[in-house]
Image (cartoon, grey):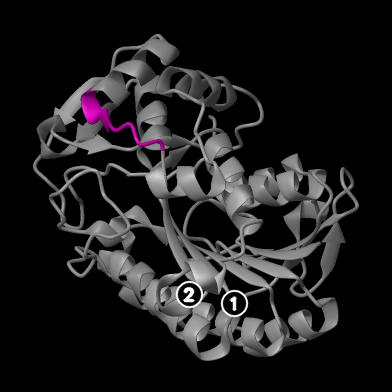
């Protein structure tokens, strides 16, 4: 099976691409390698899976084959470049597409709103158009737990209303779900959205709590704890996320099993076991062997008090079941963080 994975230099996309290629799929990954966060981490992820270029000089549009798996290759390409994207689809004749490329970050969306319009809306529209014109059998795309916004009922269920976003990022992800539904209805394009809950692990994003906290604690600097620590998150280890995503790729929505016979599905994908922020910090302290200096602050704009995934639907329909508890996951993360594989370690 030939699969296009977008966002291949990203946290989830890099590992997913490798695991799909390892199981026998032919994978072409694309990414624009933008500077939202330190690109050294993106290059390190690609390097880990056998994709490299001299001085990390990836030329736009050039295809590079992994030296670890010949069935895995990478092209530096931007989703907003419709001409190049269309040519790629027409040339490669993909069977399925996994769209993980997006402008990420809740807090960044408050100060840089236009980045989300271009990547998360125009870029996603380009993917939808290319899929419908090239007979793609299944489009899987990243949504987010942030779509639940101001919902107070927990755990969050796919049937809950999601019309109270608290950030532009969340609004853009809900927009993706609506756009996908329209294309599923109009063009019979099978689509599945995955509402990812807080993902962590080796090679994780440096703008997220695990990396921010690990760096500060290791350097003896204070960590900022918002809402005075009264927060909880459904932390989910990267390996569990990748395994669940693989199962979903293989599960093409059957119109006869979908609402109004539209081949469209949305799933929560998380650990379904929320952790209090202070317990998370304590687990990090134990793994590092260092006590954190804590700076307590009020709630931040765009943040939510808790995330908690009801994953019954995903477990029932694709047999997904996370197996990595927090202590296991944090220990693996810290082992990587302290190793030479971490390009951001001072």
Magenta segment, which residues? 271-278
- Which disc, if any, is residue 79? 1
Pointer 2 local density, CA inside 10 Å: few below 14, some 14–19, many at least 20: many
Q: Nearer the viewer, residue 303 or 161?
A: 161
Query: Picture quarter containing residue 159?
Result: bottom left
Residue at 61 percent of width and 49 percent of height = 247
Q: Nearer the viewer, residue 30 or 225?
A: 30
Name the image quarter holding the N terminus: bottom right
Residue at 20 percent of width and 70 percent of height = 163
Query: From this viewpoint, is residue 197 visible?
Result: no
Quick check: 48 left or right of 62? left
Circle count: 2
Residue at 53 percent of width and 42 percent of height = 241
Identify residue for label 2: 119
Residue at 47 percent of width and 77 percent of height = 261
Quick check: 121 left or right of 209? right
Label 1: state its secondary structure: loop
In the image, residue 329 lies at what x, y percent? 49, 24
């Amino acid at each position: 099976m030939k699969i296009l994975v977008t966002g291949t230099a990203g946290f989830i996309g890099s590992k997913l691409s490798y695991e799909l290629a390892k199981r026998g799929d032919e994978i072409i990954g694309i990414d624009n390698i933008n500077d939202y966060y330190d690109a050294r981490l993106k290059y390190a992820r690609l390097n880990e899976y056998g994709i490299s270029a001299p001085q990390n000089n990836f030329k736009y549009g050039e295809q590079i084959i992994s030296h670890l798996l010949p069935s895995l290759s990478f092209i530096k390409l931007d989703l907003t470049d419709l001409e190049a994207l269309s040519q790629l689809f027409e040339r490669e004749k993909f069977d399925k597409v996994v769209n993980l490329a997006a402008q990420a970050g809740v807090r960044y969306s408050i100060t840089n709103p236009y980045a989300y319009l271009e990547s998360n809306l125009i870029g996603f529209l380009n993917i939808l158009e290319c899929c419908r014109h090239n007979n793609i059998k299944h489009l899987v795309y990243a949504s987010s737990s942030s779509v639940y916004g101001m919902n107070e009922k927990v755990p969050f269920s796919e049937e809950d209303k999601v019309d109270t976003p608290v950030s532009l990022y969340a609004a853009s992800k809900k927009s993706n779900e609506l756009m996908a539904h329209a294309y599923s209805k109009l063009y019979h394009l099978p689509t599945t959205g995955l509402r990812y809950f807080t993902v962590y692990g080796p090679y994780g994003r440096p703008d997220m709590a695990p990396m921010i906290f690990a760096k500060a604690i290791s350097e003896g600097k204070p960590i900022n704890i918002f809402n005075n620590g009264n927060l909880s998150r459904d932390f989910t280890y990267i390996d569990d996320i990748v395994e669940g995503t693989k199962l979903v790729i293989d599960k093409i929505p059957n119109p006869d099993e979908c609402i109004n016979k539209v081949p469209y599905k949305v799933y929560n994908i998380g650990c379904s076991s929320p952790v209090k922020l202070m317990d998370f910090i304590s687990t990090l302290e134990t793994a590092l062997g260092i006590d954190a200096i804590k700076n307590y602050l009020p709630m931040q704009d765009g943040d939510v008090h808790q995330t908690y995934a009801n994953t019954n639907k995903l477990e029932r329909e694709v047999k997904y079941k996370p197996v990595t508890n927090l202590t296991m996951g944090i220990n693996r993360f810290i082992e990587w963080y302290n190793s030479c594989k971490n390009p951001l370690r001072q």
